[in-house]
Amino acid sequence: MQLTTKLSLLLFFGIISGCNTTPTEKSDSSSADLLSKSKIIDLTHEFSEETVYWVTAKEFELDVVAKGQTENGFFYAANNFATAEHGGTHIDAPIHFAENGQSVEQIPLENLLGSAIKINVSSRSLENPDYLVSVEDLKNWESENGEIEDGSIVLLETGFSQFYPDKEKYLGTNERGPEAIKQLHFPGLSPEAATWLVQNRNIKAIGIDTPSIDYGQSTLFESHVILLSENIPAFENLTNLNRLPSKGFNIVALPMKIKDGSGGPLRIIALLNE
Ligand SMILES: [Zn+2]
């Protein structure tokens, strides 16, 4: 774990204690201070019947079990839901494309929390739905912001979240089923850039505002294989990345803890220093 991450986690969870106060008192004030100084941005799409899924995946279902006044005089609401692991805002666990990779419940929490950067390629990807984030894009970010620090969570902004949940614009097709796969058009990370990241930098997770870290026309899912084989999980279908700066913010990304899961619904937020 990186020192900065450790510090921010300590601050975040408010467990720094002083000599003159009890841990509880101090802990309350430090967590309150941190949160009062942070702007919280939700990077998560809602789960509903509009949620965008991979064209071959089961879509989100919510069955209302109860909603209303009971005979005993209190209100009661409860639902059942069903969902594929890979739809809406979700995590790809390493085992999704790496046989010996971690499943969701095995991903260390340290990989899901901590300092993050954002690389904005939207000026190019909005002109070309098959855009691949390149090594040059990564190097351009570094020439303006300095080297990507060890332990960073890297977010890629393509601008495609503005089309969500319009499947024609966001996925490239309204159709579903295996035949629709050929019609998928959305940007992703090039395999060359994925390789450059794992060979030259030490990142702990990656995220993108499209349905997949590989672009829509990919058939080999090479960027998935390259990243997930290194136990670097991927966050997909993110939103609100346009509200983040290029660096200097923290991510909290907590997926549903599905035992043996290859992925799962993810609640992801950014904490910005005000
Ligand atoms: Zn996925």
Image (cartoon, rainbow, N blue to C red):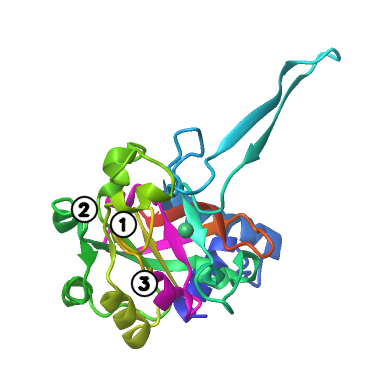
Say whether residue 62 is left or right of residue 239.
Answer: right
Q: Quadrant of residue 212?
A: bottom left
Mark earlier in primary sequence (2, 1):
2
Up/down of 144 relative to 24, above or below: below
Up/down of 43 relative to 229, above or below: above
Q: Amino acid at mark 3?
A: Ser
Front: mark 1 or 3: 1
Percent x, y of residue 168:
29, 39
Q: Which residues are magenta?
A: 224-252
Circle on res. 216: 1
Give the SS element for disc 2. loop
Distance Cα–Cα, label 2 vs label 1: 8 Å
Q: Which residue is mark 2?
A: 129
Percent x, y of residue 51:
45, 39
Residue at image point 49% right, 54% down: 90
**Pointer 2 with pointer 1, Cβ within 8 A:** yes
Percent x, y of residue 239:
36, 48
Up/down of 155 relative to 99, above or below: above
Residue at image point 59% right, 79% down: 100
Disc 2: CA contacts within 10 A as few (<14), some (14-19) or many (>=20): many
Residue at image point 31% right, 42% down: 173
Give the SS element for disc 1. loop
The answer to which of 194 and 171 lies nearer the viewer is 171
Give the SS element for disc 3. helix
The answer to whether residue 40 is seen in the rendering is: no
Q: Quadrant of residue 213?
A: bottom left
